Image: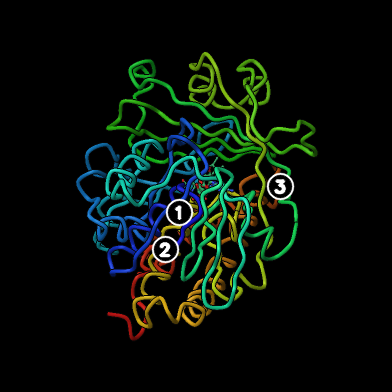
């Protein structure tokens, strides 16, 4: 199996494949693996798989377990909802919820990967599915042939373009400032160990500890009609971010104002696809279900994809790859499409203007009709993507 892309999705998929005895190699365009300097939430549906891949200790060494999801009102900081996480979720779903630094997660994955199966500096140039083999060529002129090919090459996926034709990702109307602040700089705020989500008109702000509580990660999301720059990410001015959050609670402004530099990201997504698979080629992760980050599920779903794919392939063997890839798609596509839809809906929900609709939302949250209680999230966090009927 050739896995194109050595991001979180590609590496996790390769490890899942190797675990069930499938001969997998990862081909990554970059000369060194790297992740952006930012945080990531790993929910139990993802950590269940990562722990099975032998990464439990690595995750525990730097991952932070949030005590709660704490949703708050943008100006006065009033609690709209506080759903317990650490013990409740772990007890309900049998695996931990972690807040992590992305680099720590990528390190854990790449350290588990046998070096001879990770090919850096290999940028996909061309592929051809000949029916019984997939022929692949990289820009460094290396050619390989594989039983099947997995496009785990992210939202700009070259594999997707070759197999399903060109189609641009969609600007979601949101940009995000992201930053990491040394926790000691914010000690006076006495931040609780929780994922705090501040919701206000046209914006929201999320922060949580990462890296054994040494750093505080924040994401400040703002609605914007257009994104005119060519690049999707650019240096952002802290002063502009502060201006956008004028009038917000002092805690939000203190965190935002504590960084000396920040980056601004245009958030893009893609509509659910009708198909991911053609013959011996399929897609995985952001290449097929890029979503807004408002469910914190993009990478988690990519990790799930790899586990299901491995389970399907282990049943029939790589020589019957087309059948396994079709089954993988059938099992995964409805679930990831549903989560894509929820992430999009959260844009509206989180960003409601002050007024009656927002008050109705807040009243619903106060009643405990929550979207984050263990029973409400069981279908996401309780799912075991490695369990496929008939798989060993
Ligand atoms: C602000 C923000 C917050 C988020 N928070 C969360 C969260 O809390 N929890 C969560 O689960 N998800 C979160 N996500 C989503 C998550 O980051 C992505 O879904 C995830 O990183 C996608 O992983 P991937 O491996 O599919 O793609 P990528 O990480 O994009 O990896 C693709 C890899 O393929 C390589 N590649 C590309 N083209 C080629 C080629 N032609 N040849 C070879 N290699 C190639 C790239 O170099 C890259 O290494 C967030 C996203 C954003 C923007």
Residue 232 locus on image (x, y percent): 67, 35
**Circle 3 residues within 10 Å: few <14, some 14–19, many ≥20:** many
First along the sequence among labels 3 and 1: 1
First along the sequence among labels 1 and 2: 1
The quadrant in which the C terminus is found is bottom left
Q: Are marks 1 and 2 in contact (CB under 8 Å)?
A: yes
Task: Kindly report which numbered mark, 3 or 1, lies closer to the viewer in this rendering.
Answer: 1
Q: Which residue is mark 1?
A: 9
Q: Nearer the viewer, residue 239 or 3?
A: 3
Q: Are marks 3 and 2 in contact (CB under 8 Å)?
A: no
Q: Is residue 134 above or below residue 81?
A: below
Q: Is residue 27 above or below residue 384?
A: above
Is residue 147 something that shows in the picture? yes
Disc ID at residue 310: none
For the residue labelled by badge 3, is the local secondary structure a helix, a strand or a loop?
strand
Disc ID at residue 172: 3
**Circle 1 residues within 10 Å: few <14, some 14–19, many ≥20:** many
Q: Is residue 158 above or below residue 60?
A: below
First along the sequence among labels 3 and 2: 3
Mark 2 residue's CB less than 8 Å from ligand 1: no
Residue 297 locus on image (x, y percent): 48, 54
Q: Quadrant of residue 173?
A: top right
Residue 77 locus on image (x, y percent): 51, 33
Disc ID at residue 306: 2
Task: Give the residue displayed 38% in from the left and 21% down from the top.
Answer: 189
Q: Quadrant of residue 46?
A: bottom left
The quadrant in which the N terminus is found is bottom left
Is residue 360 something that shows in the picture? no
Mark 1 residue's CB less than 8 Å from ligand 1: yes
Task: Kindly report which numbered mark, 3 or 2, lies closer to the viewer in this rendering.
Answer: 2
Task: Give the residue displayed 40% in from the left and 77% down from the top.
Answer: 312
How many angstroms separate mark 3 from mark 2 (CA)?
26 Å
């Amino acid at each position: 199996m050739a896995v194109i892309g050595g991001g979180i999705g590609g590496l996790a998929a390769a490890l899942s494949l190797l675990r069930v005895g499938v001969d997998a190699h990862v081909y990554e365009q970059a000369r060194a693996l790297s992740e952006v300097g930012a945080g990531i939430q790993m929910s139990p549906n993802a950590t269940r798989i990562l722990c099975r891949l032998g990464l439990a200790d690595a995750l525990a060494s730097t991952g932070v377990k949030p005590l709660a999801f704490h949703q708050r009102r943008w100006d006065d900081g009033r609690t709209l909802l506080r759903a317990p996480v650490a013990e409740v979720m772990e007890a309900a779903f049998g695996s931990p919820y972690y807040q992590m630094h992305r680099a720590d997660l990528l390190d854990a994955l790449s350290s588990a990967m046998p070096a001879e199966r990770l090919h850096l500096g290999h940028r996909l140039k061309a592929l051809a599915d000949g029916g019984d083999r997939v022929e692949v060529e990289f820009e460094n002129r290396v050619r390989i042939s594989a039983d099947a090919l997995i496009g785990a090459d992210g939202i700009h996926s070259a594999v997707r373009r070759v197999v399903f034709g060109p189609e641009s990702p969609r600007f979601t109307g949101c940009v995000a400032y992201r930053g990491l602040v040394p926790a000691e700089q914010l000690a006076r705020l006495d931040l609780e160990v929780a994922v705090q989500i501040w919701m206000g008109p046209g914006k929201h702000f999320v922060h949580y500890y990462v890296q054994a509580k040494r750093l505080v990660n924040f994401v400040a999301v703002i609605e914007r009609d257009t994104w005119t720059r060519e690049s999707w990410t650019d240096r952002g001015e802290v002063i502009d971010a502060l201006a956008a959050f004028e009038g917000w609670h002092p805690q939000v402004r203190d965190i935002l104002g504590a960084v000396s530099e920040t980056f601004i990201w245009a958030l893009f997504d893609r509509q659910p696809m009708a198909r991911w698979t053609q013959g011996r080629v399929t897609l995985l992760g952001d290449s097929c279900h890029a979503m807004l980050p408002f469910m914190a599920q993009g990478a988690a779903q990519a990790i799930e994809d790899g586990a299901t794919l491995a389970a399907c392939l282990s049943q029939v063997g790589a020589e019957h790859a087309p059948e396994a890839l079709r089954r993988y798609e059938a099992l995964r596509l409805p679930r990831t499409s549903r989560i894509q839809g929820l992430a999009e809906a959260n844009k509206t929900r989180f960003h409601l203007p002050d007024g009656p609709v927002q008050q109705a939302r807040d009243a619903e949250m106060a009643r405990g009709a929550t979207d984050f209680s263990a029973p409400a999230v069981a279908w996401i966090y309780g799912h075991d993507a490695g369990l496929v009927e008939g798989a060993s």
